[in-house]
């Protein structure tokens, strides 16, 4: 790719130092932010001769300027890269899907009589934060337990300087011991706050031991009312202790990271294990990940979300190693990043991955946008068709032909109601002569199922055929011959939008406003668009081929050389006689003949 003189000078002057680079377009907008251990060796690779992904090509076409920032080491480059991505949101970078502030629990331990608050920003000096909580129900349950077990004040008085004249209602219903009027000492209140901190950290065993000790002290002092309160608190803790479903991992504390991705979207999960028990689950979504390696996606999540958290375990178990693992270890000294291969830790990572997959499926279903925002059209479709499983993964097959020529088949894959373009397939129909939609459908279904089975790849939950009863019957026969007779198939006829199901004589008719029908129509229309595009491409290629083969002296071999050298019929027409004559097997006379014939036809 040709680059401007200015950009070439910038690349030549790059330092052999760690840093961050920013690609910009002609308007000065930031297209992409990246980090490098060595700017001089990393940045020029964007203009290497070998072709990269489609997205990389699109980025290169828009690059007009380069800015670099040198930092002391690669770890600092990671942090700066994350900050710049958050501030500028470049369109070619992986991004956390939303940057809203999730609620956290703050314990104001810098105050003489600390409070327990719900906040969305880390802005209270000296406070200790727990969270963030991406699940509001978990947050509410945690606060409910704290208020039931502990007597934390809920007022906003600045104690002890500013205090009321008498206790509030919380004192009379035994939700507070009224430290505001001196009924509870600062030392006793602080001991209770220490238990709150232990509880929020997941150390329920330590909290139980302390409560039991104080209950015994109150009983020995014949303070039976206080002993009864502590006994009730212990009962609440006992109710929290569910049977252990996760084995102890190492020393008992760990954060397990899970990752699931589908197309341009990804979900990440943190399972928090304390004392061998699962106490919380947090998650975030990421976008623009389709062309990014898995290691880069995981690194982006760790740097942008996980490492800034105040509460982290000393052991982090992951499904695979993130990119720049050494730099991550430098940013989080003392944290053991591990990729377990077996045992309880590996099972824990598998559980985190399953959670991530479930959340991503749910997100894709929730994000599917139709005119009437009916909830979960995928579930609605499964119910209306009477399917044994929810058709999260579904494909649609369409056949396109041009007067019996250029017959092609298309297959589009939808997951959670959204297209998964990496699984789209095109088929050039080989075993059918003339117009025979039934045979073409059978060929596509047969080839698709045979190959998926041979490669041990996921089969869809539903196959939709664009057509009527005949097309459906051909698809059912192909599935049976491929050993997949149990795979659900339906067809959608265009005229009346009728749905045909195997074994039923009459079609199923859904309301025009039905979310199930709207989803089927969207899938069908996408398959039709994909098929027509391929058929037109085939027709254009055939036209070029026939145009060249009409020229005397041009056979298949010479035609191939011309198209490989000039790219298209238009490219051949605009070539010079010398350029054509320079090809192997061509002469000046043949070059003149080719150009004369093409110019005459033009």
Image (cartoon, rainbow, N blue to C red):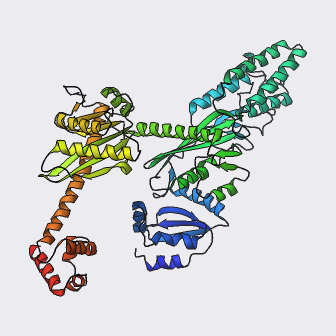
Residue 598 or 449: which is nearer the viewer? 449
Look at the image and tell me in which quarter the N terminus lies: bottom left
Q: Is residue 194 left or right of residue 308?
A: right
**Residue closest to the eye, 152 or 228:** 228
Q: Residue at x 81, y 35 (%)?
A: 112
Q: Does residue 61 lie above or below 128 as drawn?
A: below
Write the residue at 38% across / 51% down.
422
User: Is residue 316 among what the camera can see?
Assistant: yes
Quarter of the rendering containing residue 144: top right
Classify 249 as above or below 151. below
Where does the image place residue 263, in percent across and percent down from the top left?
A: 42, 49
In this view, the residue farthest toward the left is: 600
Q: Count the numbered circles shown.
A: 0
Say left or right for 430 vs 364.
Answer: left
Query: Quick check: 301 above or below 348?
Result: below
Q: Residue at x 49, y 40 (%)?
A: 357
Residue 590 is drawn in which quadrant?
Answer: bottom left
Residue 525 appears in the picture as rendered: no
On the picture, is 53 further left or further right than 273? left
Residue at 23%, 42% (x, y): give it: 442
Q: Residue furthest right?
A: 221
Comparing 118 with 443, the one in front is: 443
Name the spot of residue 272 as percent of width and height, x first: 65, 38
Res. 108 image quadrant? top right
- The location of residue 34, given as percent across then percent down, is 54, 63
Looking at the figure, which quarter contains the C terminus?
bottom left
Q: Position of residue 481 (x, y in %)?
A: 28, 38
């Amino acid at each position: 790719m040709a680059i401007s003189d200015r950009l070439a000078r910038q690349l030549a002057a790059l330092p052999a130092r760690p840093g961050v680079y920013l690609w910009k377009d002609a308007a000065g907008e930031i297209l992409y932010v990246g980090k490098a251990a060595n700017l001089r060796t990393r940045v020029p690779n964007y203009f290497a001769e070998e072709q990269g992904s489609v997205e990389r090509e699109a980025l290169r076409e828009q690059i007009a300027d380069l800015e670099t920032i040198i930092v002391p080491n690669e770890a600092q480059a990671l942090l700066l890269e994350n900050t710049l991505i958050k501030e500028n949101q470049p369109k070619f970078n992986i991004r956390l899907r939303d940057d809203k502030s999730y609620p956290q629990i703050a314990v104001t331990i810098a105050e003489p009589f600390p409070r327990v608050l719900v906040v969305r920003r880390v802005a209270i000096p000296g406070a200790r934060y727990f969270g963030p909580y991406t699940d509001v129900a978990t947050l509410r349950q945690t606060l409910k337990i704290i208020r039931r077990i502990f007597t934390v004040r809920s007022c906003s008085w600045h104690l002890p300087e500013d205090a009321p004249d008498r206790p509030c209602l919380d004192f009379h219903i035994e939700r507070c011991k009224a430290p505001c009027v001196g009924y509870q000492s600062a030392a006793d209140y602080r001991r209770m706050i220490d238990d709150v901190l232990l509880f929020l950290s997941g150390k329920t065993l330590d909290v139980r031991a302390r409560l039991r000790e104080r209950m015994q002290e109150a009983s020995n002092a014949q303070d039976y009312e206080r002993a009864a309160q502590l006994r009730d608190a212990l009962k609440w803790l006992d109710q929290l202790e569910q049977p252990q479903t996760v084995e102890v991992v190492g020393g008992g504390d760990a954060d397990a990271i899970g990752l699931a991705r589908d197309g341009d979207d990804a979900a990440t999960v943190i399972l928090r294990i304390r004392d061998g028990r699962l106490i919380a689950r947090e998650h975030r979504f990421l976008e623009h990940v389709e062309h990014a390696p898995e290691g880069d996606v995981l690194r982006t999540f760790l740097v942008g979300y996980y490492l800034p958290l105040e509460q982290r375990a000393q052991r982090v178990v992951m499904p695979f190693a993130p990119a720049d693992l050494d730099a991550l270890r430098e940013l989080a000294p003392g944290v053991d990043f591990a990729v377990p291969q077996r045992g309880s830790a590996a099972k824990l990572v598998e559980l985190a991955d399953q959670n991530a997959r479930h959340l991503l499926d749910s997100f894709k279903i929730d994000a599917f946008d139709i005119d009437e925002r009916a909830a979960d059209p995928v579930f609605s479709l499964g119910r209306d068709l009477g399917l044994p499983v929810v058709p999260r993964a579904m494909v649609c097959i369409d056949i396109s032909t041009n007067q019996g020529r250029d017959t092609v088949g298309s297959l589009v894959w939808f997951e959670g109601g959204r297209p998964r373009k990496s699984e789209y397939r095109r088929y050039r129909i080989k075993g059918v002569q003339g117009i025979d939609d039934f045979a073409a459908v059978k060929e596509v279904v047969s080839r698709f199922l045979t190959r998926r089975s041979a490669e041990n790849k996921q089969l869809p939950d539903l196959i939709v055929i664009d057509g009527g009863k005949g097309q459906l019957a051909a698809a059912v026969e192909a599935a049976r011959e491929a050993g997949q007779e149990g795979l659900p198939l339906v067809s959608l006829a265009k005229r009346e939008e009728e749905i045909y199901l195997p074994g039923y004589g009459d079609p199923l008719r859904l309301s025009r406003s039905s979310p199930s029908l709207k989803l089927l129509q969207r899938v069908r229309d996408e398959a039709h668009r994909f098929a027509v595009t391929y058929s037109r491409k085939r027709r254009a290629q055939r036209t070029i081929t026939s145009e060249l083969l009409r020229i005397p002296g041009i056979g298949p071999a010479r035609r191939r050389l011309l198209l490989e050298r000039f790219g298209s019929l238009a490219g051949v027409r605009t070539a010079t006689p010398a350029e054509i004559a320079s090809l192997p097997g061509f002469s000046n006379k043949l070059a003149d003949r080719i150009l004369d014939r093409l110019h005459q036809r033009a």
